[in-house]
Image (spheres, grey):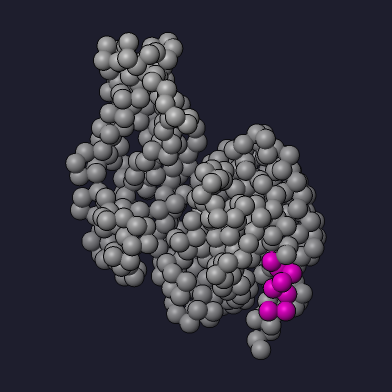
Amino acid sequence: MDPIKNYIETNKDRFLDELFGLIRIPSISSENEHKGDMVKTAQYVVDQLLKAGVDKAEIMPTTGHPVVYGEKTADPAKPTILVYGHYDVMPVDPLNLWDSPPFEPEIRDGKIFARGAVDDKGQLFMQVKAFEYLLSANQLQFNVKWLIEGEEEMGSPALAKWLPNHTELLKADLILVSDTSMIAIDTPSITVGLRGLAYMEVEVTGPDKDLHSGLYGGAVANPANILAKMIASLHDENNHITIPGFYDDVLTLTIEERRDMARAPFNLEEYKKKLNIKTTLCEKGFTVNECTGIRPSLDVNGIWSGYTGEGSKTVLPSKAFAKISMRLVPHQEPHKIAELFARHFEAIAPASVKVKVTEHHGGFPYVAPTDTAAYRAASKAYEAVYGIKPIPVRSGGSIPIISTFEQVLGIKSILMGFGLDTDAAHSPNENYHLECFYKGIETIIWFYKFYSGELEG
């Protein structure tokens, strides 16, 4: 048996046991009650890096949750790879939709079911185990640094502030990331683009207290009704966003570039069946893949008002709230988009209510080059493991810190993800295929080998 496959097969039970230990810690970065769990998770990551063979690993404080930094110096004269990942996870609500406890990993149908299984604990662990193999086989040809943060699911606000003060510490030639997806389990792809993000919260206030809906309904503005109308007006009949100036900086791809994107296999009927929907709702003139890859979007992520408990309570609510995210494309600037949104949302509010708009976090879009030694090495690595060349794709998701890395550190990133769009990341019953986990380890090992050859060549 191939020595890489043999190592993975021999140690796969240990790999899972160690990964499950990481998953069991509820590292939900956005919930204050889990602050202690964040430190506990960071320490677990430190211990796993040390166990894998780094020279040193430590927890470093930030203005928010801590980061984990580690390093292994193979030869000071050789290039350095900086591995980035995150140990925080999304909240688990609604809990009743989980088929098993979210922080008790369970294997069903060849998949790991748990919060963080694919985003990003499982994918981060692939990097650790690939490194472990290379070191144990005396095949590590690079210096390797590790930067594992605890706020990616919040937009990495603390890391963005921490980076400028640690540029010397993080000097590297390439950033290696596993936090993205592939087209299908048998169709590998390399993410070459990420959408940016502007995340907002809106509050609409009518009367100064909840009112009896029978005595006041029809005479006093209902902020829930008004908020619904305001949100509905943010798209027109073509699903085009109506905020003035929103599209001013959008990069428009050429016909040739759009044709190249269309090479990615996509079956619309299977897509609809998988999501249990009758039809898609795209911006007019663009395909599903284009709408999630090269076009911006605006979506309500949460909306609440009035009484939502069991039974009935006939109130006219005082306030209504919504959380709204806008995914951005090159060359949209998140703070500019946030300002455009706030200005427009305040302008369309009727005089019967007051509006408050809060900008939470954001991130710039990112486009990775495909003519580099790193991309060629990654492509060869996927082909070595999967038997076919990976397809370059632009993801609809965001990893805000990736563009910040390039701005602050001046380093390009290569995004080698192994998740699938069926993994339910951010949703109940998040899962990760064991096949993707093991092949991910193998592919990353081959990346190191091919990247060394690319640089020497």
Q: Quadrant of the C terminus?
A: bottom right
Which of 349 and 391 lies nearest the eye of the viewer? 349
Nearer to me, 433 or 71: 433
Instruction: Report the predominant secondary structure element of the magenta stretch.
Output: helix
Is any atom of residue 278 visible in this view? yes
Q: Quadrant of residue 436?
A: bottom right
Does residue 147 appear to the left or right of 430 in the view shown? Answer: right
- Which image quarter: residue 348? top left
In the image, residue 404 sits, relative to residue 384, either above or below, namely above
Residue 25: percent from left, percent from top = 70, 49
Quadrant of residue 269 within the rendered picture: bottom left
Q: Is residue 198 left or right of residue 406?
A: left
Can you say whether 153 is above or below 370 in the image? above
How many labels were placed on the picture?
Answer: 0
Q: Is residue 150 magenta?
A: no
Asked whether, in this view, residue 361 is left or right of residue 28, the answer is left
Q: Is residue 12 magenta?
A: yes
The stretch in magenta equals 9-16
Q: Position of residue 92 (x, y in %)?
A: 56, 45
Where does the image place residue 96, in percent across and percent down from the top left? 54, 46
